[in-house]
């Protein structure tokens, strides 16, 4: 486990959408820094696999499968996490890919396409923050990290308009909540990701041309996002709040 300013021993972290890819990388790095990690995913088998791998590596984790868009399931899930690991000190809102998501030009999209993105990428994130924030304020310490995307700040002709709009909205919440809770010991930030190694991007017909625009000429790694999250959640990140930090290999292309 880690030590010094990056040591998260004694902290409980919840990572949503942590059953694979970026979320898994975040969960693994937080655990390696000493945090107890609740691995959330919509699919129980994914959450259990990642929690098991963390345990095998010497960390402590529990699977926390529930749908973050379901308020009742969220309340039940948080109660279970509290019982098994303790109250949530660190929240990483990573869940952001609706089941069956498709990329489609806005002109060809339907209202249901918009609502799925808004429900998961904005409203669900707001709901989880709203649920864990009172306890963090009461304890005088907390870290909230919202995973966002470069699509929030740059227009992309790849059919992600509703996704980008939802991410723009949640970044606004980050700035306002960070300002409201500034003196409390709770920090609130966002990590806006560029192209990451995951199944969705690898299946995209746009991928090769987008990588060519990334100065480092590669995709980002889940562990790199996890490392950034550890920094924000550590004592070294305590002076950083209300920020949207871009992890994108020098590119403005969206996740």
Image: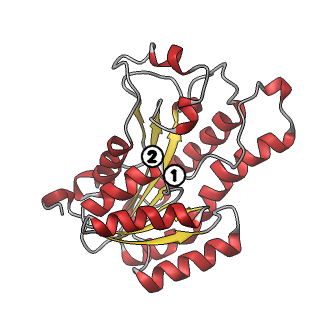
Do the residues under discs 2 and 1 have CB atoms within 8 angstroms? Answer: yes
Task: Tell me residue 118's x, y (percent).
Answer: 71, 47
Where 3 sits versus 198, above or below? Answer: below
Q: Which of marks 2 and 1 is nearer the N terminus?
A: 2
Instruction: Give the residue displayed 45% in from the left and 46% down from the top.
Output: 22
Q: Which mark is residue 94?
A: 1
Q: Is mark 2 on a helix, strand or loop?
A: helix
Numbered circle sitting on residue 22: 2
Q: CA–CA distance between discs 2 and 1?
A: 8 Å
**Viewer-nearest of labels 2 and 1?**
2
Taking depth in this image into account, of 166 and 242 the one nearest to the observer is 166
219 left or right, relative to 108: left
How many numbered marks have been drawn onto this rendered protein structure? 2
Q: Is residue 228 left or right of residue 112?
A: left
Label 1: few (<14), some or many (≥20) within 10 Å?
Answer: many
Can the viewer see residue 123? yes
Q: What x and y, as percent, mark residue 169? A: 63, 43
Q: Name which residue lies at 40% across and 80% down.
A: 85
């Amino acid at each position: 486990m880690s030590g010094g300013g990056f040591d998260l021993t004694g902290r409980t972290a919840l990572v949503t959408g942590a059953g694979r890819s970026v979320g898994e990388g975040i969960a693994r790095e937080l655990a390696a820094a000493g945090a107890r990690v609740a691995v959330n995913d919509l699919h129980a088998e994914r959450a259990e696999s990642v929690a098991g791998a963390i345990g095998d590596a010497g960390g402590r984790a529990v699977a926390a499968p529930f749908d973050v868009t379901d308020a009742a399931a969220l309340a039940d899930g948080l109660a279970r996490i509290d019982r098994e690991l303790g109250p949530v000190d660190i929240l990483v809102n990573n869940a952001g890919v609706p089941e069956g998501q498709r990329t489609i030009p806005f002109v060809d999209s339907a209202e249901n396409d918009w609502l799925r993105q808004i429900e998961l990428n904005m409203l669900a994130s707001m709901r989880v923050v709203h649920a864990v924030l009172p306890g963090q304020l009461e304890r005088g310490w907390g870290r909230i990290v919202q995973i966002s995307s470069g699509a929030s700040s740059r227009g992309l002709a790849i059919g992600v308009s509703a996704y980008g709009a939802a991410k723009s909205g949640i970044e606004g919440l980050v700035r306002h909540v960070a300002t409201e809770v500034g003196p409390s010991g709770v920090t609130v930030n966002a990590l806006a990701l560029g192209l990451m190694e995951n199944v969705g991007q690898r299946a995209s017909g746009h991928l090769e041309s987008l990588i060519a625009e990334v100065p480092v000429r590669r995709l980002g790694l889940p562990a790199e996002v996890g490392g950034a999250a550890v920094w924000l959640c550590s004592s070294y990140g305590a002076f950083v709040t209300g920020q949207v930090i871009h992890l994108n290999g020098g590119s403005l292309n969206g996740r």
